Image (cartoon, grey):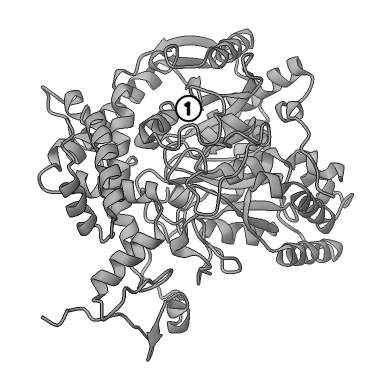
Amino acid sequence: MSDLIRKNASELVELLNNGNVSSVEVTQAHLDRSAAVDGAVHSYLYQNPETALATAANIDRRRAAGEKLHLLAGLPIAVKDNLTTTDAPTTSGSKILEGWVPPYDATVVSKLREAGMPILGKTNLDEFAMGSSTEFSAYGASHNPWDLDRIPGGSGGGSSSVVASFQAPLAIGSDTGGSIRFPASVTGTVGIKPTYGAVSRYGLIALASSLDQIGPVSRNVLDSALLQDVIAGHDPHDSTSLPESLGSMAEAARKLDVKGMRVGVIKELMGEGFQPGVMARFNESLNLLQQAGAEIVEVSCPNFEYAIAAYYLILPAEASSNLAKFDSVRFGLRVAPEGNPTIERVMAATREAGFGPEVKRRIILGTYALSSGSYEKYYGAALKVRTLIQRDFDAAFAKADVLVSPTAPTTAFKLGEKLDDPLAMYLNDIATIPANLAGIPGMSIPNGLAEEDGLPVGIQILAPAREDARLYQVGGALEKMHEEIWGKRMIDFAPELEVRG
Amino acid sequence: MSEITPDLVRHLAGLSRILVTDQEVEQFAEQLSLIADSVATVSAAIEGGHVPATSHPIPMANVFREDIVEPSLTQEQALSGAPDSGDGRFRVAAILDEE
């Protein structure tokens, strides 16, 4: 197996720009890796080696001709399958979109193409990104490269496992309540949910429009920073897109300095319910930050207690509306019952056949939350809780420059363990959901292995809206301190996967 | 407790245009009752005090773009994913039944 696949994206960028390695070599090395391990990991729903290699060859030709290229030109990437691509089927993990090839590219995909980054394939996810394990994908679960019997997190378990198994140096994810950060935490990788609006959502198949945000997935902080710098920016096609630039994330990631920064520890997101190994690593990281000159302060966010409840009303409400577009008319599946059915009966039969159980549960729940008898009690109240959570963050950020918590209460659980218990599954996102409700940016980076099971643990860093750079500054500094202690990167602790010849 | 009855699930599934089997109705009623009980705590959070609602995390208003013509999908592209089409239109089953 080529040693190119184990390199950080930033190292590959340097090799590509210096002409020490071609994009075709880098792309082929990753495709070979997928051929060897993806049968077991199942990160990808679709790969087309020819189109990836054609993009790579084109970049190599342009580089040889002396053309000025984007910094990341030639660096291959994997894309979550809820972003539209004109040259690959886009299913969002659902049978209702099986085989659908969209007529337009997502803005993020267009930006990757403009930068000259070969797209290795489309990664697996829970159906319409509803889930924390990829087990609700209509095409089968992805597996955690650290232990194939365990979940890679969700919904973006395809994107987390693809970088954790060295099938791609970078991946695109989307995060509605933790779908980038939770998978990062359980696979020993890095994931960032940028500020709401920092990255265009045009061409992202919407789950909950006021919560969804696209972001980078990688094996280290600088690599994600380089990717956020490619995909961020205003887009007239997304009316919620922020008009202003948030600056260079790569520059922030290279500062490696937290001296004088105030780091707030969220009292409500630790202790009870959090695995001992998760808390031990978290406290260790706090000590490192303190030793590096950061000031640790405790903050309280009392309304976080209601965050999951508010989230599981707002999300289903928005999802029930967004998913109404899957009506058997304009795209996707159509199932016609026998006889001369009306369009309403065709719709109902199509949605019965095309949606999986979690999607049906959430659509029905959302319809309930929005129905006239329960609107004020449920949806209306949830929107008010959202205000309270924003106020909690405002008060916390008055005392601290960034906030930290464990990313998730536990390490990766076993496939099947929580599949029949929706409420237990929802609790995985207890620490990540508040950021989506408030629109603020959040990052998860690996901070060690839990003693009790030897599995990776993540620490979450949160910053005020538009201050994404702070995440990269603190994350980069903490990552460097960890790696100095470990003597290697977190991903280098992962067991070797069995390679198919 | 258990305010989501099987009949309510059937009604909501009908509103959502999703056919459901009897087995699904039973299962969803049980699961959604638990979830509904759990999310009902939002009411407790806002008791005794006026709290404005937040529907969008980053406030924005009147977002316009320049009024210039941009390329858009051709009719063929727009119809490319349709299960059925004809004469440049989406073809669907009868809107009204025979009664």
Residue lying at 72% horizontally and 53% vertically, measured from the top left: A76
Instruction: Indicate the quadrant where residue A64 lies.
Output: bottom right
**Taking A394 as reference, is A199 above or below it?**
below
Residue A304 placed where, x, y %? 33, 23
Q: Residue furthest right?
A: A20
**Taking A487 as reference, is A129 above or below it?**
below
Residue A148 appears anywhere in the view: yes
Residue A379 placed where, x, y %? 21, 40
Q: Secondary structure at mark 1?
A: strand
Residue A158 placed where, x, y %? 59, 46
What is the number of callouts on the image? 1
Rate crowding at label 1 as few (under 14), some (14 to 19) or many (20 or more) other CA atoms within 10 Å. Answer: many
Residue A384 vs residue A106: left or right? left
Instruction: Indicate the quadrant where residue B39 lies.
Output: top left
| Residue ID for mark 1 | A462
Residue B21 vs residue A407: left or right? left
Q: Chain of mark 1?
A: A
Q: Residue A420 or A360: which is nearer the viewer?
A: A420
Q: Residue A460 or A372: which is nearer the viewer?
A: A372
Residue A269 vs residue A77: left or right? left
Instruction: Indicate the quadrant where residue A485 lies.
Output: top right
Q: Residue B22 or B91: which is nearer the viewer?
A: B22
Q: What quarter of the picture does the N terminus of chain A occupy?
A: top right
Q: Residue furthest front?
A: B23
Residue lying at 85% horizontally and 50% vertically, measured from the top left: A501
Residue lying at 21% horizontally and 58% vertically, measured from the top left: B14
Q: Residue A28 or A453: which is nearer the viewer?
A: A453
Residue A121 placed where, x, y %? 65, 57
Residue lying at 73% horizontally and 21% vertically, measured from the top left: A483
Amino acid type for the residue under numbered disc 1: Leu
